[in-house]
Amino acid sequence: MRHRFAAPGGLLTAVVVFVVAFALTRSLLWPPLLALVAALGVYLMLDDRSARQVANDDYAGEARAKVDEALARVKRIRAQAKSVASPAARAALDQAGNHVTELFARVRAKAPNSLYSTASQLNGHLSSLEGVLGQYLDIQSKPQLYRDPQVLTRSGEQAFYRFAEFTLESVRLVNQGDMAQYQANLETVAPPELPELSGGQP
């Protein structure tokens, strides 16, 4: 906990030492050097983490950033999903969002060292889902601009259902402690199952 105060504590110490030293010496040579030494000493005293702890803290920060990025995608998908006309497709997208949020919570609790990879993989899957949903909504609102719009929207809906099933199965695997199968599922299942809806325009 103390390491959080290391940087601001060191900076404050440097300022104080510089001001006091300059007031006493009226020289620009020693005050900066004394300020640097004092700041470094305070920083090292407050930040008493081991190299391993520093690495773990860095990992945790990067994992949180990836999770936040994925949850921002979920939020955008939820907002877009409100415009989906099909109740079943809309429900699948909502369920997928719930599953993703639950998955992060359970991975954080059961296998925190897998949180970064989970968030990275899901960011890719969610990016694909966002693309499919965006084009699905365009087909839904302007079907006359596409050949076989009903076929294309059905393909998009199937992608939504598969993604909801994929995320639910991922949560179940984590609950069962089957992390090896979970990782394999995460790396291979979702992206190939999301269809390309482009190319339907005349």
Image (cartoon, grey):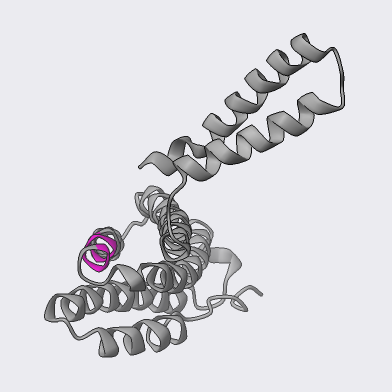
- Asked whether residue 183 is drawn in magenta, I would say no
Does 146 sit left or right of 188 as displayed? Answer: right
Q: Position of residue 194 (x, y in %)?
A: 44, 79
Report the predominant secondary structure element of the magenta stretch.
Answer: helix
Task: Tell me how many marks there are.
Answer: 0
- Where 28 sits versus 121, above or below? above
Q: Residue lying furthest left in this view?
A: 176
To which quarter of the image does residue 113 belong? bottom left
Picture residue at 38% right of the left edge, 72% below the top: 118
- Asked whether residue 107 is drawn in magenta, I would say yes
Q: Which of 33/169 is in front? A: 33
Q: Which of 39/119 is in front? A: 39
- Where 141 sits versus 158, above or below? above
The answer to whether residue 30 shows anywhere in this view is yes
Q: Position of residue 177 (x, y in %)?
A: 16, 81
- Quadrant in which the C terminus is drawn: bottom right
Q: Residue lying furthest top in this view?
A: 23
Q: Which of 182/33 is in front? A: 33
Q: Position of residue 201 (x, y in %)?
A: 63, 73
Does 13 sit left or right of 106 as displayed? Answer: right
Picture residue at 66% right of the left edge, 21% below the top: 17
The answer to whether residue 140 shows anywhere in this view is no
Picture residue at 35% right of the left edge, 42% below the top: 1
Q: Which residues are magenta?
A: 102-108
Q: Position of residue 22 (x, y in %)?
A: 78, 15
Does 22 sit left or right of 187 as displayed? Answer: right
Does 192 sit left or right of 34 as displayed? Answer: left
Q: Which of 14/177 is in front? A: 14
- Where 175 sits versus 130, above or below? below
